[in-house]
C-alpha cells in the first residue's frame, strides 16, 4: 500500500482513514492567511455511504486504499433482490438488495456485465456502463398542440424503468440513456 501526501489526496482517489475505505469526492488545497497549506476534502465512506468533511495538513500522510474490481453478470430481479453470478461460474450465484446496488440497476438487462468494487471481502460499490440502449415498451400518445411547449412525457423501457423523454419518442424506438443520471440522451433507431 502506498502512502499519499496531503496534496496527492484528490478526487476519485480511494484512501483508508481510521481503518475504513473512503472515496475522495472533492479536494481543495488552500492557504489560510500566513499558515501552512491545508487540503479540505469531502470523503464518502464506501461501506456506510456517509459523506464527511476532513482537512489534511502538510505533515499528514494517508494510506491509499486497494480497491479490487471483479466482473459480475446480472441475471435477474426477484422482489427486492438482484441476482448475479461470476461470468465463468454460472452456478456460483449471489444477490444484493436495491439499497446495496443503487438506482442504476434499473437500466440493466439480464446478462449485462458490471464491475463490483471490493475492499478486502466487503463490497463497496458497483460500476455500471455509462450509457445503455433500451427499447421503449410504453409511450403515451402525443396530443395535438403538445409540441408547442417542447415538453416531455414519461415512458417505460424494456427493463421496466420509467423516465422522461421528448414527445417524439414512440413505442418501439431504441433510445440511449445516461445510466448515472437516468436521463434520456438520444433516439438511436426503431
Image (cartoon, rainbow, N blue to C red):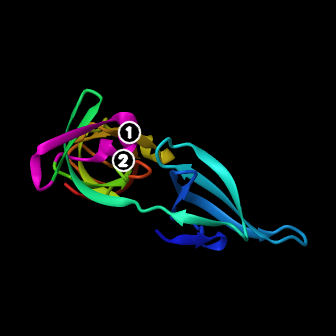
For mark 2, give the secondary structure.
strand
Residue drawn at (65%, 73%) of the image: 7
Side of 114 relative to 90 (left or right): right
Q: Say whether residue 123 is magenta.
A: no
Point out residue 182 in the picture as x, y percentages from the top left corner: 40, 48
| Above/below status of 10 relative to 82 | below
Of residues 21 and 158, the one drawn nearer to the viewer in this rendering: 21
Point out residue 147 in the picture as x, y percentages from the top left corner: 43, 46
Point out residue 35 in the picture as x, y percentages from the top left corner: 86, 70
For mark 1, give the secondary structure.
helix
Question: To which residue does mark 2 refer?
Answer: 123
The total of numbered circles placed on residues is 2
Of residues 65 and 28, the one drawn nearer to the viewer in this rendering: 65
Quadrant containing the C terminus in the rendered view: bottom left
- Please report the bounds of the magenta region as a residue range: 87-110
Question: To which residue does mark 1 refer?
Answer: 100
Residue 38 visible in the displayed image:
yes
Q: Say whether residue 107 is magenta.
A: yes
Label 2, label 1: how far apart the Cα atoms are: 9 Å
Point out residue 43 in the picture as x, y percentages from the top left corner: 59, 54
**The label number, if any, that marks residue 27 in the structure image:** none
Residue drawn at (31%, 41%) of the image: 106
Residue drawn at (54%, 64%) of the image: 63
Q: Are marks 2 and 1 in contact (CB under 8 Å)?
A: yes
Amino acid at each position: 500500500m502506498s502512502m499519499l501526501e496531503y496534496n496527492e489526496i484528490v478526487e476519485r482517489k480511494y484512501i483508508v482513514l481510521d481503518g475504513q475505505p473512503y472515496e475522495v469526492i472533492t479536494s481543495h488545497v488552500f492557504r489560510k492567511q500566513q499558515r501552512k497549506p491545508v487540503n479540505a476534502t469531502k470523503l464518502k465512506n464506501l461501506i456506510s455511504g456517509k459523506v464527511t468533511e476532513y482537512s489534511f495538513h502538510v505533515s499528514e500522510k494517508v494510506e491509499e486504499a486497494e480497491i479490487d474490481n471483479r466482473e459480475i453478470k446480472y441475471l435477474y430481479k426477484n422482489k427486492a433482490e438482484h441476482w448475479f453470478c461470476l461470468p465463468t461460474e454460472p452456478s456460483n450465484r449471489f444477490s444484493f438488495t436495491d439499497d446495496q446496488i443503487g438506482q442504476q440497476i434499473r437500466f440493466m438487462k439480464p446478462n449485462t456485465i458490471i464491475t463490483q468494487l471490493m475492499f478486502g471481502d466487503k463490497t463497496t460499490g458497483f460500476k455500471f456502463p455509462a450509457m445503455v440502449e433500451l427499447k421503449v415498451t410504453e409511450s403515451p400518445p402525443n396530443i395535438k398542440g403538445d409540441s408547442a411547449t417542447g415538453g416531455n412525457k414519461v415512458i417505460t423501457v424494456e427493463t421496466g424503468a420509467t423516465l422522461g423523454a421528448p414527445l417524439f419518442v414512440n413505442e418501439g424506438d431504441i433510445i440511449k440513456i445516461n445510466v448515472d443520471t437516468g436521463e434520456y440522451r438520444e433516439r438511436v433507431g426503431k
